[in-house]
Structures are given as structure tokens and as C-alpha cells.
Amino acid sequence: MAATFNVQGPTAFQIKHQAVGTATASGFTTLGHTDNDDLISVTMENLHDPYYSTETGREPAALIYQGSIATITATLIKWDTAVVDTLRESLWAGAGGTTGTIGQNQFDATNFTNVENLQVKLLPTYTANIETYSYLFYKCYVESMSETNWGNAPKKLVLSLKAVTRSGSDRGIYTRASS
């Protein structure tokens, strides 16, 4: 079962290419901003692999925990196209737009020169009289990114990112801080 929370209010969606072990709260580049109509949604899901035995039939005899993953879904009302282009180039392919290697580990920069670790920071830009938190996700990858173009409606950038558990002594997916 998944748990979901929303980041309320207008928010700056920031990114940084940096290794997980050297995580700091500064040096992020603002990709874009949300408004109060489209809240950022974060869905946390624990992955379990059922193990079936002959003694229990189709009921799982055990559930093997495979880790946790977060899905960050955001709709940006304004964004920096240069940052979006950099994000496309550096995460899916080389800087020159060359394609990645099939079967590559998106988190292994030692064997694949085009892989860069992505960190995401959600920073509320309006904090008056509301309880707000900033969120920092340490190990992310882009699942989808597209611009809407629906008739006369303003364009929006729709993002879906996945965040996984980071390695090291603090194995959380994200940290939360008061804004």
C-alpha cells in the first residue's frame, strides 16, 4: 500500500547533479515553479516480493522487502528551458545527445560516463501563515518529462521522477526541514 503527501503552496522545483555521499542543501539550480492549483505529489511505496511455498498454497509464506521508492509528480507553470535541456542530456544520454547503453545502471557513474546522480529539492516560495516544509531527495531519476500544449491554455511542464533509498549510514529517501 502506498502513502501519498502533497507539497502545499507555490514551490520552487530545484535540481542538482551531485553524488549521494556529498549531499548539501546549497548549490541547487531552479528548474521551475509550481502554483497553488497543481500541488506536487509524492507517493511512497514499499516494494515486497511474495514468496510462495507449497504448505500455504496461494497465500504468501513470506514477503521479502525489496526497498522503498518515491514517485514525485509535479506540474510546473514556468521553467528554465536551458535547465530542462541539461536535464534531458545528462540523465538519459551523453552531453552530446548520444544514447545510453542498454542495460546500464543509471546510478553507476564509474562504468558509464554519461550517468550523473540527480538530487531534487522542493522549496516552498510562499510560507506566510501556513505550515510548510522543504524536501530534499538524494538519489533520483527522471521517469517522464513532457510539455502540455492544449489549445489556448498556457503551456505546462509535467514531470515524474523516482527517488530511491540512498546508501550509507542514513538510508532514507528524503529529508524534511521546516521552511
Image: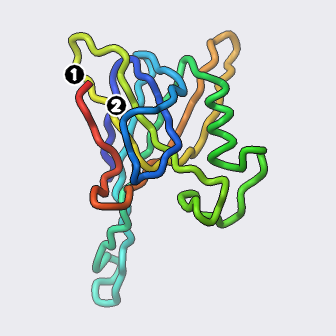
The reply to whether discs 2 and 1 touch (Cβ–Cβ < 8 Å) is no
Q: Residue furthest bottom?
A: 54
Residue linked to disc 1: 131
Q: Is residue 20 above or below residue 178?
A: below
Q: Position of residue 28 (x, y in %)?
A: 47, 32
Give how far apart the Cα atoms at labels 2 and 1 are: 12 Å
Q: Is residue 64 above or below residue 165?
A: below
Q: Nearer the viewer, residue 138 or 63?
A: 138
Q: Quadrant of the C terminus?
A: top left
Classify 10 Å Cα crowding around label 2: few (below 14), some (14-19), many (20 and above): some
Query: Which residue is at a point 44% across and 23% down the rendered structure image?
Result: 12
Of labels 2 and 1, the one closer to you: 1
Residue 106's tag is none
Q: Is residue 49 above or below residue 90?
A: below
Residue 5 lies in what quarter of the image? top left
Q: Amino acid at mark 2?
A: Asn
Residue linked to disc 2: 6
Q: Position of residue 74 (x, y in %)?
A: 48, 31
Q: Nearer the viewer, residue 142 or 117?
A: 117
Say whether residue 148 is left or right of residue 64.
right
Q: Amino acid at mark 1?
A: Glu
Say whether residue 141 is left or right of residue 40.
right
Circle 2: element type:
strand
Q: Nearer the viewer, residue 66 or 1?
A: 66
Q: Is residue 20 above or below residue 127?
A: below
